[in-house]
Amino acid sequence: MTISRRTFFARTAVIAGATAVATLPFSEYLASPAHAAGRYAEPEHVRDAARRALARAKRTKSGKPSPNGWEMELATDKGGAVWTRPVPGTPIEGVAVRIGDVETVLVHVIRRFHYEVDELRKGDVVGWRSPNAVRRGLAESNQASGTAVQIRPGHYPSGVKGGFFTPQQLVIRDILAELEGVVRWGGDDKRPDESLFYLDVKPDSPLLAKVVRKLRGWQEEPGKGAGGPVDVLAGKRRSAAKELAREQKAAA
């Protein structure tokens, strides 16, 4: 049996749409190429499910930005932008962060911390927190948008400095420089929080996109990325770390 070109592409679009539904949160599916391609051919039940998911996603939005400019979310794993994501190679079963580029960056921070600063245990990392549970005037409120994590907040309490030994600080500075200033360490803030690491760029930042491309490229190269050999005292790396530390401290 032969089918027309139009019928072939219509059926292909339906398959693509169904695959997208199976693999993406609906809020992302609605903006996906599969959805766009099949919007005239999808079964009604697929469109209904997508509309319901979009309605749920809207209910997670607060309409208010965190200090770094990303919208705070009212819930996690409820169809919005913040989901519990794995941290490969660590005992951390999952951390609630904004999916996509932010997730890529923050998971990289957590993994390098685990490998090079101090070994983490289950429960050591806190990601998203409700807007009602954070102090709005402090950088910790970036957690409410899924763009920040606290690593061992009980060990490095807010307002206290000096929680890390010098070799550990060298690694932290190297991580920040490797991420080209996309992430800021709470230890540099006026009210320090040495457990806190948060996005220091706005949504749609070209620098964020550039850094994420670099990190994802490393995933394809053995020995690159978190867990690979790193000499934090190497000349260029150390110079970059010192320069960024001066810039970020001055911006406090």
Image (spheres, helix red, strand yellow):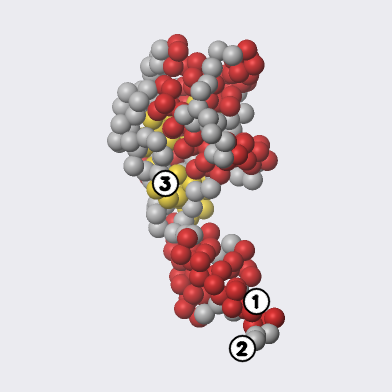
According to the picture, the residue beneath numbered tag 3 turns out to be 85
**Left or right: 147, with 156 as reference point:** right
Q: Tag 2: residue type?
A: Met
Check contact, mark 3 vs mark 2: CB within 8 A. no
Mark before the other along the chain sequence, 1 or 2: 2
Mark before the other along the chain sequence, 3 or 2: 2
Percent position of residue 212, x then y: 59, 40
According to the picture, the residue beneath numbered tag 2 turns out to be 1
Percent position of residue 77, x then y: 39, 54
- Secondary element under disc 1, as helix, strand or loop, is helix
Q: Tag 1: residue type?
A: Phe
Q: Tag 3: residue type?
A: Arg
Percent position of residue 147, x then y: 49, 40
At x 59% / y 62%, what residue is drawn? 32
Quick check: can you spot residue 206? yes
According to the picture, the residue beneath numbered tag 1 turns out to be 9
236 over 39 or under it: above or below: above
Q: Residue furthest bottom?
A: 1
Percent position of residue 152, x then y: 34, 28
Q: How far is disc 3 from disc 2 in space, using C-alphas?
A: 46 Å
Q: Residues within 10 Å of mark 2 (few under 14, many from 20)?
A: few
Mark before the other along the chain sequence, 3 or 1: 1
The residue nearer to you, when weighing 17 against 204, is 17
- Secondary element under disc 3, as helix, strand or loop, is strand
Q: How far is disc 3 from disc 1 in space, using C-alphas?
A: 34 Å
**Left or right: 165, with 215 as reference point:** left
250 over 25 or under it: above or below: above
Q: Residues within 10 Å of mark 1 (few under 14, many from 20)?
A: some
At x 64% / y 70%, what residue is drawn? 37
